[in-house]
Amino acid sequence: MMRLPHFRFQVPGTVDEAITQKHEAPPDAAYVAGGTDLYPNMKRRHQEPSVLIALHAIDELRTIVIEADGTVSIGATATLTEVASHPAVQTACPALVETMHLISTPILQNMGTIGGNLLLDTRCNYYDQNHEWRKSIDYCMKKDGEVCWVAPQSPRCWAVQSADSVPLLVAMGATVDLVGPDGERSVPIQSLYRDDGILYLSKQQDELLTRIHLPSPNGWRSSYRKVRRRGAFDFPVLGVGTWAELDSDGVVRDARIVLGGVASSPVVVEAAAEALIGSSLSAEPIEEAAQLAWKNGRPLDNTDFTLYWRKEMIRPTVRHALEDLASHR
Amino acid sequence: MRRPNPAGRLDFMASFGSAIEPRVNGEPYAVAVPVHKTLLEVLREDIGLTGTKHGCELGECGTCTVLIDGQPVLSCLALPAALEGRDVTTVEGLESADGLHPLQQAFVELGAAQCGYCTPGFVLAARALLEGNPRPSRAEIETALGGNLCRCTGYLKIYEAVELAAARMRGEPAEPTREMLYGAG
Amino acid sequence: MAPVEDQLRVVGTSLPKVDAVAKVTGRTKFADDLFLPRMLHCRMLRSTTPHAEIVSINTQRAEEHPGVVGVLVGRDLPNPYGILPVSQDEHALCLDKVRFIGDPVAAVAAIDEETAFEACELIDVEYAPLDSVADIEDALGGDDPAIHLYGDAHNVHKAIALEFGDVEAALIEADLVHEDLFFYEGNTHLPMEQHAALADYRPDDRLTLWSSSQTPHYVHRALATVLEMPASRIRVIATPNGGGFGGKSDPFNHEIVVAELSRRTGRPVKICLNREEVFYCHRGRHPTLMWIKTGFKQDGSITGMHFRSFLDGGAYGSYGVASTYYTGALQTVTYPVPAYKFEGLRVFTNKPPCGPKRGHGTPQPRFALEVHIDKVAEKLGLDPARMRLDHLVEPDSVTANYLKIGSMGLGACIEKVVAESGWNDRFGKLPEGKGLGLACGSYISGAGLPIYWNNMPHSGVQLKLDRGGGVTVFCGSTEIGQGSDSVLAYVVAEVLGIDPFEIDIVTADTSLTPVDLGSYSSRVTLMTGNAALQAAERARELLVRSVAEKWDVPGVRVAMAEGQVFDVQDPECTMTFTEAVVLAESKFGTIGTVGSYTPPRSPGRYRGAGVGPSPAYSYAAAVAQVAVDVDTGETHVDDVWIAHDIGRAINPVVAIGQVEGSVYMGLGEALMEEMTYRGNRNVVHHHPSMLEYKSPTTHEMCRVHTYLIEDPDPNGPFGAKEVGQGPLLPIPPAIVNGVYDAVGARVDEVPVTPQKVLAALKRKAKQEEPREGPKKALTFDWPDAIQVPPPWAGGDGRALEEGREIGGGGVRA
């Protein structure tokens, strides 16, 4: 049986307590919410934090509310199921509801949290393996080793961004609140991510992601499409998040297209989005955008499927995501 | 490389901490376990409820599914220390003095359990589905059971068993059809 | 005498399985559910290099680690073992060399699993690496060091050449000669239950081993050999298997290791493998490259066939010699092949060993043959269903390679799925992206010969009747989810006229139950069923004689049904079954009977004739309806219509479960399952996890329309033939043929991944051959074929050359 390494388990009751405990704990301490990403990693000895600061008892972190300005804000430890079944989210952003249902399995959606999904460890075939397996390849750069086996000449790690909610929320321009010992800040979600498989987050070690704010629900649409082998369990080998702001005549004023699962951070394909501006999301601009996205997506050989096929999938998947956008009410 | 170290052992003792008192199948238990033991391990090794099985211990198969406050979760990724005051239901908690739960009865009648190893997880996931949706469509059953792998049945007898149990739980006098028991044509 | 058909009350009825309630309530005790006082936990240290000499192993730090009670290395268990007598090439822990990543080199027993895990990390192993052998081509290249010092050529475990009739002449007679190259990727069983074993050695020199094994008898023999203990002091109990599919059919190193650790520590020792280790146990589907060349007449009949298979065997023998023969054995049992040549070889590579997975060695050649025929039908302008229907092997006939066919229901199967799927109106006529594919298959109902040479029964049953009316069946067979315990109950209940749920079943315990060879080769229903039938009839005879004497009527007037015994001519004259047992026990003493089963002798007498013969062959035909996305190459199977010639369904709902499960597993093999390794990093397994080994979820499963074709076979109990494996066989080729009908792309390789379909479609768009699959046939200096004239050429089952070994040779299974 795969078992967890030993750790001290702390259960703060408030955000302030959590920040203080984290600050006072050894540097390897970790926050844990649903645990669906961290615990498997710990069992495989990717991470062996000596202290876990569990967030489940902090009620304020779990709420989903409509703010005074009409925007929806989601507590980071709301489970994916809670996000998907909340009326405010269903009204504000049907695509986010659909995305929650595409993550892993219904059972894991009951455990995993939206904050945990945003901070999901980057993934790689050479990394997401048991300790014994990694020993037999002499480990890799991301943990215990020197080399990135995806690109052995590379000075950096190429582990891949694999959270489904990220391309969508980046496309939507959502923001997140981070609370640390030095106070609170609110940042665009895109700025959370760094293009590096190891240091994939810009968040400070002690900072706690507390809330996600959706944009004010007026005049925009969004969609998410996912490519994976099976209809459940699997991480995306490609995720496409799209967003468009339309005027009253249905003409696109602004748009964003974001690819997930192709690099260590979400890839915003600006050229592709520009092809949509001024259009009414008809077939021609959609095809042009899909083509431009295909040009800009460069997956590496670190997930299921061949990288050639994954790249080929960018075109039809972006097209489908934009067609969803066009057909949304 | 991971090396065992004495400090790890000290942590082990420190994390032994307070006893936990999980409520399992409506019964209060008091067990003293190290905090890093998952619910799966505690159920099987400390409480003696071996009906909960395991297939990967990494959240990749659904075999170890139990219900917490009626909702299916994976016991291999749940820590008892984080479940204070919550109700755990395992397969052992499904039957009552009146006999089998309708889902168990339907699984028996239709041969929906072959080797039976994934069965506890499926029965519990199905129970959670029927609690919230007494008349699920085939597609809804497929989706709800998408997090449980089975290598024996091809899932079809399981779907039929869930539908049969659902009908009976709605109070309908449902019986297996001839096609379910004897094949098409 | 068994009840006649119209009087059957249990057989043919869809009843629950006798163990169903235990399984749905969590009561069934699988191996890892067992806990004994003072029990230790075992972990094994495994090789991190694919091929190396072991220079040294130092276990001192592990032994000194607090909580460690015992440590073992290879020299502690020096005796070799292996499932087949011809390949005794395994050691419980590697002696001087490791042969794949995952090969165990040391083991620790400790107070808990964590301590054992920690101690394994404290064992220092020094390896001297050797070049590794990655695949078939690499092995045949001949420039890598030998993995084993035995075999038919350098890194060639086994090479076979057999010819039945003059194939070259037969090809000249043909109107069309067609040649194909196919590849079937390796895949694995992936039982939900990880292998587990618990050993308990007592100081009075008695050992008990509980294990999730499909073959406790073979484990028993291996333990006696390796531990050098009398078999009579060893008791092996196979716990119900949480899925087997062939993956728990070998004696395994971890079983021997916990037994020895228990002997050394004097305490019970348990091991439960983690999922990664289950991938290293493997024994699954051999990756197989196949070349096939067949001559056809214009009407679609075959004139002759030449078939070659190249199997990637992995690091050890396992069942591999039998697997290799099986890739050539059953091509002849569906459509007549007047002249047939088979050449097959199995190479050693530095990967976990391959062995028997559902269909053992036959899904690969069946895939090749059924796709090959689909292509030829198109070339000849024939409907693929019609072409098969017009050329079926006759019932009660003997094939070119001397397989004795009994009942043969393939025609009925094809007709059924053609009618139900609307084949005649829809094949070739569905819109672009949708397609229908048809394929057939056949499988053995148990092997005609045992794995090791002996003249004893393959299956034994003891029956105990007690004065309380209780009936207990004792049989060595192993319940792996297929319903084998239930079959025993149904058969005995039918004969004795009692309720099957009143019967106690004791199985898979080498001390309590007579030998049954195990749950493999689809042998259990036919063989244990026949043994149970015999034991039950003998018990019935004792009861009938006692009752007849009491009533003073001839025995033929005594009938038994529904727990009652009655006079057929005087319905008023009855007694309960219990009263009859009391009468019999009063007259004869304690009532116990035995039954046993030995398959009929096969007509083949040449070396290699041991693989293929069976008391009865099942047949199946399937039509798959697929949907292919031309933008992505993704294939989804919507429906499968499958008809299976089962002889008779002892329990139809259980049989349907086996059909549906076989379709599921065939679908996984056809679309996504791959047991592959990394060329760039040490031949390490690509993805030994449940997440990345793609096993179909609810979302991928198709609708299945099952039709049981019942044409009782004289060799089966109540006419029953197998159903556990055969229905898998037509599924991969039916799906692949369906993909061709849908989009005109030929993928001569499984799994049919989206990238392969897309590659074939791109070629099609460029007006190139719309095919994806293996490109290069491999060459090998084949031995001269053993010449065996077929029956219609005056052959008697023997090979031509005098002086060559005849009479079955050493190879069976």
Image (tube, coloured by chain):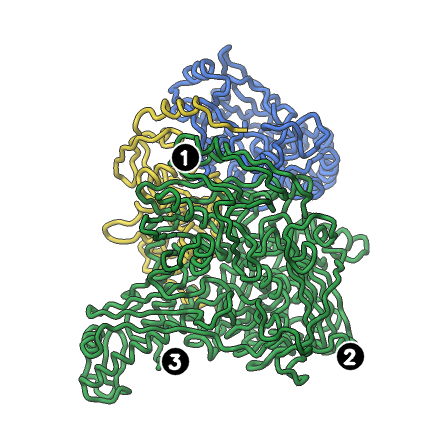
Quadrant in the rendering for residue A156: top right
Q: Which amino acid, mark 1?
A: Val
Mark 1 vs mark 3: in front: 1
Left or right: residue B51 compared with residue C710: left
Mark 3 vs mark 2: in front: 2
Measured Cα–Cα span from mark 1 to mark 2? 72 Å
Q: Is residue A259 among the parts visible in the rendering?
A: yes
| Chain for numbered disc 1 | C
Q: Which chain is yellow?
A: B
The image shows residue C172 at horizontal and vertical percentages of: 79, 77
The image shows residue C373 at horizontal and vertical percentages of: 69, 69
Residue that appears at 73% across and 55% down = C774
Residue carrying label 1: C68
Measured Cα–Cα span from mark 1 to mark 3? 62 Å
- Dot 3: what SS? helix
Q: Earlier in the sequence, mark 3 or mark 2?
A: 3
Q: Which chain is blue?
A: A
Residue carrying label 2: C173
